Image (cartoon, rainbow, N blue to C red):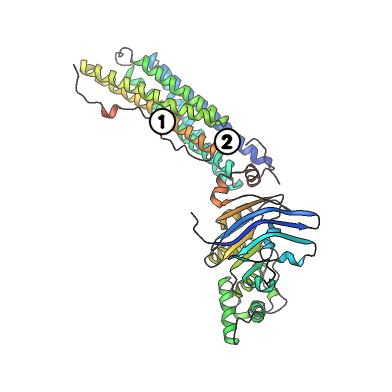
Amino acid sequence: MEDNHIQSVFDRDLERIQALIMKMGGLVEMSILDAVKSLATRDEELAAQVRENDRKIDALEEEINEEAARIIALRAPTASDLRTVLTVMKISANLERVGDYAKNMAKRTSVLVQMSPIEGSAKSIRRMGQEVESMLKEALDSYFQRDAGLAQEVRQRDVEVDQMYNALFREFLTHMMEDPRNITACMHLHFIAKNIERMGDHVTSICEQVIYLVTGEMPEDSRVKEDRTAFVSMERDG
Amino acid sequence: MSTNEIKISAKDVQVYYGETHAIKDVSVDIEDKTVTAFIGPSGCGKSTFLRCINRMNDTIDVARVEGEIKLDDEDIYDKDVDPVQLRAKVGMVFQKPNPFPKSIYDNVAYGPKIHGLAKNKAELDQIVENALKRAALWDEAKDRLQAPGTGLSGGQQQRLCIARAVATEPEVLLMDEPCSALDPIATAQVEELIDELKQNYSVVIVTHSMQQAARVSQKTAFFHLGNLVEYGETGQIFTNPNDKRTESYITGRIG
């Protein structure tokens, strides 16, 4: 809804809270990219920076929650205004989780740089991270533009992330079975891949919030899930 | 969600004040045992429409009502319907508390007396007590029933008017901005009362306070420029209205 409120302070409140989301989104995107980059380039300093950066993200989430509570208390928002405030709170919670995953990846990277690298894995993980980052960027764009169609498209893209995760899972399994000395590194790498896969789920949840914001209803169709690792067995097939 | 019976059914109602077309093609089914809120900007026709339901517009010479309004399948504008009898069934509470310049007791007893609802003094006493209890005024008024109604506080006076309205055992209670002259505590008491009244009556309330409509009603009707723009579950109207004009109004974008 582009029309302005009769009370202009209400518009300023809503604009302010959305600006905070934009800022938080930017920081989280950067964290994802830096986390996978630090792994690929074995850059311990960058990994430390990602961990440090997470404090800012957490602080922003808190600020957004306080601001949202204030708007609810003082302005009693209704209809699309109410949905905006609810959406903002959920999006910031999702962003905060994504930030946590990036921080966790950076922690594991600090450990991984002490070990010999697993061939090709950092590159695949970086691709996966870049994919999730680009999804997040578009999800946030769909939010700022109130574009439910774009949100729906991004939501469906999570399948690709799930598939990348499946492929990595098999790869790590193979490495570990080939040489038990790879197990420690592969376990860390697997958690990193799983973290990115979870990020994708949070991005999907942001998209669903955008659809709710625009249409007033949560999407009913279930999205395709491609994480099949729960069904992979340890048996080696010849 | 709502499975209540239809109490009032309006079809293609038009109201003219002289040349002015104040209500345009309004059709609406109002449920029994439900609080229905009429909202909309000043001059949108919500009060005019409310007044059609107990034929208060009959008292305005230039007003002309067309269409059909049925109360329990009976056309209230039928020639055979006595407006005074109708108003006993369809009670009304106004914006400003307007107690008669009589005692608290007489204010409440007046309606039952003229409609012959009590056979003797004891019965009348009982009716007055029940009405005051239902209006949550009994505890404050029982020791001074002979004191003038006008001596009560604003909030008490409004509850006295509600007691007066329920004393005739109406089936429908119309309320035109019943809390606009009251402080928040008295407002909360009246709102609590409205919630209790809906167990027995169909309550229709006109309010300028969007929050009040959201708090007390189960159904909300939004009027704009004489049209009924949207009518639906209150929860839906306040989270996801269908019409752009409703959205603009409740979010404070048009006056």
Q: Is residue A172 left or right of residue A99?
A: left
Given residues B33 and B239, the one toward you in this image is B33
Mark 1, residue position: A201
Percent from the top left, x then y, of residue A41?
39, 13
Q: Is residue A156 left or right of residue A172?
A: right
- Mark 2 residue crowding within 10 angstroms, few (<14) / some (14–19) / many (20+): many
Report the chain holding disc 2. Answer: A
Tell me which numbered mark, 1 or 2, is placed earlier along the sequence. Answer: 2
Q: Amino acid at mark 2?
A: Ile
Question: Image quarter for residue A71?
Answer: top right
Residue at x 38%, y 17% (from the top left corner): A39
Asked whether the viewer can see residue B179, the reply is no
Residue at x 60%, y 79% (from the top left corner): B128
Asked whether the viewer can see residue A232, the reply is yes
Given residues A72 and A223, the one toward you in this image is A223
Q: Secondary structure at mark 1?
A: helix
Mark 2, residue position: A17
Q: Is residue B168 left or right of residue A220?
A: right
Query: In the rendering, which numbered label is found on residue A167?
Result: none
Percent from the top left, x then y, of residue B153?
67, 70
Looking at the image, is A215 positioned above or below residue B44?
Answer: above
Report the chain holding disc 1. Answer: A
